[in-house]
Amino acid sequence: MTRWTVERQAEAPGEPERVGGVGWTAAWLTGAVALVGEGGLAFVVYFLAGLRDEHYFAAGIGAYVGYLFLIVVVTVVLGLGGAIGSAALVLPSLQLSRLSARRTGRAETMRWCLAVCGAVAAAAAVCAGVPTLLLGGSWTVPPLVLLATFLGLAPAVLCTRAVTVVRRNGARFGLAALVLVGGAALSAVTFVGGLLAYGTGLLQEYEPPRLTDAQLVGTWTDGHGGTLAVRADGTAVAHGLGPRKTDETYAGDVPWEQCEGSGTWTQGPSPSGTTEFELSVSGCLEGPGWQYGGTEDRPTLFYWIGDPDSLNRYVLHRDQRAGGATAPGRH
């Protein structure tokens, strides 16, 4: 009678089978690919959300090679992070779930596993939040760490737990492959869906502000002593305008140096069809026009430094000293 009872308990739902070395290898691999899938999805969401903010993309063969290199780097980093995270967090959390369930005489169910993930996330929030609060940081850090840790850990632990329940090693590795394919498919669907949402107007991609002549009138500054006074009569006065060799985005092929003098300004169409700010000051700042950036409330004027594909910009912000501090002028 006693033997029959033990066998029945061993077959209780949710009680995982003891796995050997190969089984734990499959479990580790499943946790790793689950974390990689979560990281890839987070990267896609971050990219799509960033399209709503001010952004600029380089073009040309060199830029495309750079984007391809970035994708390779991100893939390698996600792979290494997933492998380390599975060994350091996912498997220990799963073992903690199994051992704690055994100690309390309970079946190690999915709910119990999720509760353990919540406890691990809470511990991470305390470890990260207490030092942050003591150093004067934001109170939002602990709940954000708690939420991020739980959302990242729980799916990976549940997928890994499923591997320990499966009896055959072939099926275990097949489940790891299924998790990998599922994660990649979810990221791809999210990416395509996001692009369609922007393309159909369901989501609004960033667009530069459209400024009237009256909105342009005033003093613009680069935050490093350079200013441009734009006047309503169409004249402008430049003082120390231009990139400096001490600035982070200075390029050696800058076609002009600090500008001093007066001239005129107007608005006109750019080669791409958008409106640009055209400034003509005797002896400098002649050539391609300035572009608009920022937002309607906090607009910027910027000039490409050297090749636009370098994405180096010389940026002017509207002088806010009348209402507060001046925003920094380098991007």
Image (tube, rainbow, N blue to C red):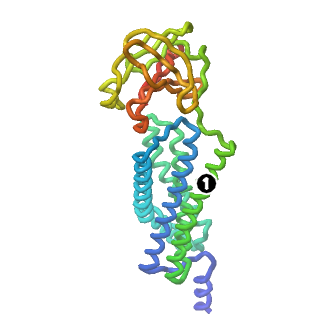
Compared with 308, 151 (above or below) is below
Q: Amino acid at mark 1?
A: Val
Compared with 293, 95 (above or below) is below
Count of labels in the image: 1
Q: Residue at x 43, y 15 (%)?
A: 227
Instruction: Return the residue nearer the eye: 98 or 204.
Output: 204
Instruction: Pick the quarter of the image with the N terminus.
Output: bottom right
Instruction: Return the residue nearer the eye: 299 or 10.
Output: 299
Label 1 crowd bin: few (<14), some (14–19), many (20+), radius 10 Å = few
Q: Residue at x 62, y 65 (%)?
A: 111
Instruction: Pick the quarter of the image with the C terminus.
Output: top left
Instruction: Return the residue nearer the eye: 7 or 317.
Output: 317
Residue 78: % across, % down: 44, 58
Q: Is residue 103 in view from this perspective?
A: no
Residue 86: % across, % down: 45, 64
Circle 1 residue = 192
Q: Residue furthest top?
A: 233
Compared with 108, 236 (above or below) is above
- 324 left or right of 252? right
Residue 32: % across, % down: 46, 65
Q: Residue at x 53, y 26 (%)?
A: 292
Q: Residue at x 50, y 82 (%)?
A: 170
Q: Secondary structure at mark 1?
A: helix
Q: Residue furthest front?
A: 271
Which of the 4 image quadrants contains residue 202? top right
Q: Is residue 169 in view from this perspective?
A: yes
Residue 48: % across, % down: 57, 46
- 7 left or right of 243? right
